[in-house]
Amino acid sequence: MSTSEKSTFKAGYIVVVGLPNVGKSTLVNNLMRFRLSICTAKPQTTRHRILGIYSGENFQMIFWDTPGLIEPKYRLQEAMMRTAERAIADADFILFIVDVDHQDQSKNETLLTRFAAVGKPIVLAINKIDTISRDALLPIIDRYRHLYEFADIVPVSALHGDNVDELEKVLIRLLPVNPPFYPLDQITQHPERFFVAEIIRGKIFTNFGQEVPYSTAVVIDDFVEKPGKKDVIKARIVVERETQKAIIIGKKGKALKEIGKEARIEIEAFLQRPVFLELWVVVREKWRKKEKWLREFGYDQ
Ligand SMILES: Nc1nc2c(ncn2[C@@H]2O[C@H](COP(=O)(O)OP(=O)(O)OP(=O)(O)O)[C@@H](O)[C@H]2O)c(=O)[nH]1
Ligand SMILES: [Mg+2]
C-alpha cells in the first residue's frame, strides 16, 4: 500500500438496526456476499451482535448485525436489547432498516427517535421493495424523507439484491478515513464453533413452530479437528421443557435426525470439510429467565 492509498483508506463500524424480521441479516449477508447470519421467516432470529467485515481495495466496512428491537419480556430479550444498544454506542453510523409494511410505521418512528438521540448519521434502507409496486413505494420514501434528515435513503430488496450496490456506495461514502481495523481477508471475528451453533439453531427455527425455536439454545460441547478424518462436533440443544425435548427428538428420533442431517450439510459447506455431527437434547427449566444459563449459553457477556 502506498502512502497516498493509506491516507484515503476508509474504514468504520456500521450498526444494522431495526424491528424484528425486516431483513437486517439478509441485507448484511447480501452486502457481504457471504452467509454470515442465519435468516428465517420468524422474528427474533438474531440474538447476538454479529460482526461481519467487508473489505474492498480502499475501504473496510465492519457490520454489526443486531437482534430486532422490541420491548423485552424476559431476560434473554433484555440481554438481546443490551447487545443492540451497545453496538449502536460503538458504531460510527447507523444503518436503519425498515420494510415496506405500513403497519410498523409508528414502531419505526419510535425507534427513529431513539436513534436520532444518539447523534450519529443514519442511513435508511427501505427493504422488501420486491413486494410492492413502484407507485406504492414513492409515498413511503416521501414520508420518511419528511420525517428525519437521513444521511441517505435507499430502497432495496435484500432478498433479490436489488439496489444493494447503490446502498454499498452510500455506505462507503460515509465511512470515516481510517486505516483498516482488520486484515483485508478477514470476514469475521467469531470462531467457527459460533457459526456451527448458529447453523443448528437456524435449523430449529425453520423446522419447528412458534414456541420451540424461542426456547432453544445451542451449545457446542466438543469440536475436535481430526486431520485426514472427519471433524467431530458435539452440540447440545437446550430447551425449557420436557415436551419441547420430545418435539425436537420426534417419533423414534426422526425429527432430530433430520435436523442433524440438514445442519451437517450446511456446516460442511461452511467449513469446507466433512464433519461428524452429534446432537443431544437437554432440558434447563426457564433458562431464558436465568442469568446463570444466559451466561453459560453466551447471551449475556
Ligand atoms: N420478499 C422479501 N423478503 C425478504 C427480503 N429481505 C428479507 N426477507 C425475508 O424476511 C424474513 C426475515 O429476514 P431476516 O434477514 O432474518 O430478518 P432480520 O431483520 O434479521 O430478523 P431478526 O434477526 O429476527 O430481527 C426472511 O424470511 C427473509 O427471507 C426482501 O428484500 N424481500
Ligand atoms: Mg437477523
Image (cartoon, helix red, strand yellow):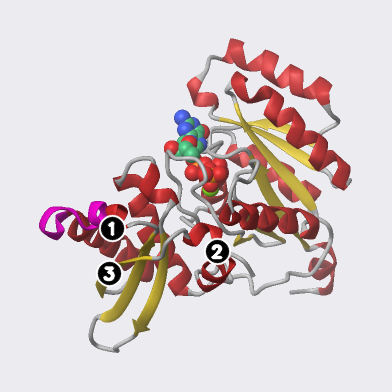
Q: Is residue 111 left or right of residue 121?
A: left
Q: Give the camera-side residue of 170 and 94.
A: 94
Choose top left, top right, bottom left or bottom right for residue 119.
top right
Q: Quadrant of the N terminus?
A: bottom right
Decide if ligand 1 comes within 8 Å of the CB at mark 1: no
Residue at 66% from the left image edge and 48% from the top image edge: 16
Q: Which residue is mark 2?
A: 290
Which residue is nearer to you in this view: 191 or 287?
Answer: 287
The amino acid pointed to by label 2 is Lys
Decide which of tag 3 and tag 1 comes sooner along the chain: 1
- Badge 3 amino acid: Trp
Image location of residue 232, percent across then percent down: 28, 80
Location of residue 256 by image quarter: bottom left
Is the Cβ of the residue at disc 3 closer than 8 Å to that at disc 1? no
Question: Residue 146's x, y, as percent?
Answer: 83, 20
Residue for point 63% across, 46% down: 72
The answer to which of 223 and 145 lies nearer the viewer is: 223
Give percent across and percent down for residue 91.
Answer: 77, 57
Residue 245 has which mark? 1
Discs 2/3, front: 2
Q: For residue 160, say whether it is visible.
A: no
Tell me which segment is drawn in magenta. 245-254
Inter-mark Cα distance, 2 to 3: 21 Å
**Nearer the viewer's eye, disc 3 or disc 1?**
1
In this rendering, position of residue 42 left or right of residue 259: right
Badge 2 density bin: few <14, some 14–19, many ≥20, Cα 10 Å = some
Residue drawn where x is 48% and y is 56% of the image: 34
**Is 135 on the left or on the right of 210, as rendered?**
right
What is the magenta segment's predominant secondary structure?
A: helix
Q: Amino acid at mark 1?
A: Lys
The residue beneath circle 3 is 280
Q: Is residue 180 left or right of residue 220?
A: right
